[in-house]
Amino acid sequence: MRLVVIGGVAAGMSAASRARQADANLEIVVLEKSKHVSYGACGLPYFVEGRVRSLRQLQVHSREFFQEERDIAVRLDAEVTSVSPARREVVLAGGERIVFDRLILTTGARRDCKSISGADQPHVFSVDTWNGAERLEEHLRTANPLRAIILGAGYIGLETAEALRARGLQVQIWEASKDVLGRSDPWLTEIVRKQLEQFRVELRLGAAATSIPSADVVILACGLTPNTRIAAEAGVELGNSGAIRVSDRMETSIPGIYAAGDCIETTHLVSGRPVWFPLGTTANKTGRVAGAAAAGLYDRFPGIVGTSIARVCGLGIASTGLSPEQAKQEGFDPVPVQIEALDRARYFRGKPTRIQLTADRRGRLLGGTVIGESGVEGRINVLATALTHRMNAGDFLHLDLAYAPPFSNVWDPLLIAARQLVKLLN
Amino acid sequence: MRLVVIGGVAAGMSAASRARQADANLEIVVLEKSKHVSYGACGLPYFVEGRVRSLRQLQVHSREFFQEERDIAVRLDAEVTSVSPARREVVLAGGERIVFDRLILTTGARRDCKSISGADQPHVFSVDTWNGAERLEEHLRTANPLRAIILGAGYIGLETAEALRARGLQVQIWEASKDVLGRSDPWLTEIVRKQLEQFRVELRLGAAATSIPSADVVILACGLTPNTRIAAEAGVELGNSGAIRVSDRMETSIPGIYAAGDCIETTHLVSGRPVWFPLGTTANKTGRVAGAAAAGLYDRFPGIVGTSIARVCGLGIASTGLSPEQAKQEGFDPVPVQIEALDRARYFRGKPTRIQLTADRRGRLLGGTVIGESGVEGRINVLATALTHRMNAGDFLHLDLAYAPPFSNVWDPLLIAARQLVKLLN
């Protein structure tokens, strides 16, 4: 019995490892088109920044580790060009054919820049892959560029802006939509704009590039698209989001073929709808579930609530659930509040935390954003857990959250926001 | 219509304020036996430490604020000696009688040291009240004591140990039971013991004092007991825990008489049983619910999950739910795991976080402890929210928690612990 996994980064290696755990006798082959497996792509902006000294630091396990410790065969430079479900085989770029009994697709996502002419010039980079980040970092060291333009104000764009400022470049961000972080939230966008401004990063909204703008360095951080060509050509169904549709066991529309990571869509537990929300955490989790399923175990992935976090020029910015505008689009009647409160006692150097908390008119929490210098990840995670359980604002107010002066305030900023919401809803 | 509130610290002032919010016409009188209202008692150890310069800094609002801004009459030095439900009146120490239509008891808790002879000596202190902390701090400044013994290794005892070390004293802690923090958890106790040792604080377990030991300063941080005398003598029912039994609206067994804060018992949402678990956060919340109820509004407090946090010689130590031993006592079949993992990426100075996570054999999460230098409050709060919703370990593993390298790891330490648990349970 042979399991073939296409892709060897987060989802792929999680899937292979979980399958091995579940079945010691399975033959497992991972096909990775690049020369690198199992690295933390979320750390790439910090390599560009110079904080991560070597890309090796981002590697979780080496190819040899997988081969020797987990009996997982990893082939590098192995680009799959097509999959034949009927013949149960994959075809590599060189023409080689490899048969499989079970297949897991973890083909990831890419920057789709067809609409931007000149994207193949040597001063144009992306920070999504080992090779891309390596090439950019070398360019920064050797060509001493002065002016950078980043296309896209998603988290990779914002993190890279900070990284390039840290290396002394002038930085502009061009974002095609009117909001940052793909969140449709003017409140959040304004806070991010001001924060960037303090670090002399200019944010241009509604600035859709049709050709590569004039600068010493251009970063492609827009147009992220799931890699679905191989899947679609093999007859695997895609969802409305454009990503691969899977069951909660990560099985595609073709039995025995599974998919995980940045190429699949998943269920948004607040809206109840399929969404494409590619992130490393979800890639690892869905990879595990796909690996379990491919090895015959039962496991399921229920979905996400849309949690994300980024450091933007020193400030922690995290969101979960739906923004007020997104909630409206999903048919809710959103009531948002925005508060500012100290994240802990003043005599423990408490700093202001800003929170936006949104509930439906009938009380159900729909989403929130937490912004501050510390405690941001903890607070957004509490909210993410609450959204997972469809909490309403009134019950949220009674959560038994930890308090001592070095850590919080007797009314945690989250609870202050919930109290405001409850007042508004009554 | 007159509401009388006995006690003017956290629960009492929350109750009075909430009642005012709910009913602008109610006459509200707060009777406080000391000279101080509305202060954050949890900050008192930090006043002793010297970090809080003046006790005024711990005052949330002044008596004048309540009078003028909220039309709440606050009487200081007003000690209630008895309550007559039949006559609807309270009697003050001087003999004065005050009638009420609704009454809220927030009589708090005290150190009951009857079993320790000599507790009334001038070098014996407690850090639970404004006056106690003030007296201790003055003694430290003027008498230059060298050796301190703290009776009790609850969070007040541990926080005070750190405070006294910061002021240069030699410190011993005597704890009557075999564990710290009232948690029946040898794993936790050992970690705390080692941490104290590093700060040259000696922890003696199983050391029950029957008389005040020989030292320059002795701190009473043991024997905390709910103040129920007035309630009990008035015929208000007490629960098995010894604290006042209330409904989820904070009504006592006598209609129209409510209670909140450190003098009541509440439901532990993991065990489902009434417990006495006095904390400032719960005092504020139950105060609000009592205030709403006394003003005729419907609100309810569902209970707690037993969350607490303390800084112990620089280390954050937080628990929620039941320890393995407590879980066994409650009839569960607990399966605990202990893990250690970095709290964020190594290149963001990730520090080790230790987590104990306990589930019932059938999968339901029962409790956990998080110990580390940062991110402790956030992680324990996620767990507290999960316990509130009776999550099992497998579902917990799929929580959509935030990840970016400055804040966490792609597998949050909490999820690593859950993964271990799931492995053990299968």
Image (tube, coloured by chain):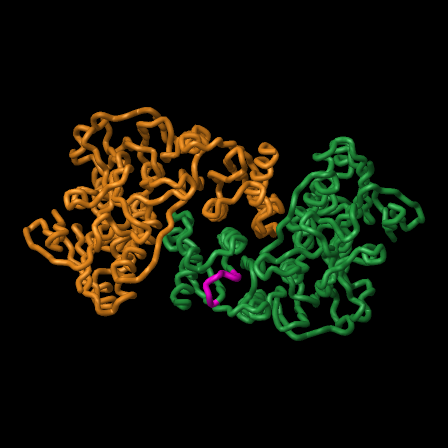
Chain colours: A orange, B green
Residue nearest the observer in this picture, B309 or A264:
A264
Residue nearest the observer in this picture, A380 or B296:
B296
Looking at the picture, how far across and down is residue B96, in whole percent? Answer: 93, 45
Horizontal side, residue B87 vs residue B24: left or right: right
Above or below: residue A54 compared with residue A211:
below
Looking at the picture, how far across and down is residue A226, in whole percent? Answer: 24, 41
Look at the image and say whether residue B364 sits in the magenta stretch. yes
Can residue A127 be spotted in the picture? yes
**Residue at 24% in and 33% down:** A218
Look at the image and say whether residue B25 sits in the magenta stretch. no
The image shows a total of numbered marks equal to 0
Q: Quadrant of the N terminus of chain A?
A: bottom left
Looking at the picture, how far across and down is residue A51, in whole percent? Answer: 34, 48
**Residue at 65% in and 52% down:** B46
Q: Quadrant of the C terminus of chain A?
A: top right
Residue nearest the observer in this picture, B368 or A91:
A91
Looking at the picture, how far across and down is residue B221, in whole percent? Answer: 71, 63
Q: Residue furthest left?
A: A95
Residues rendered magenta in the picture? B361-369
Above or below: residue A381 compared with residue A160:
below
Horizontal side, residue B76 vs residue B390: left or right: right
Can residue A194 be spotted in the picture? no
Q: Which quadrant would residue B414 be assigned to in this image?
A: bottom left
Residue nearest the observer in this picture, A372 or B260:
B260
Above or below: residue A31 compared with residue B32:
below
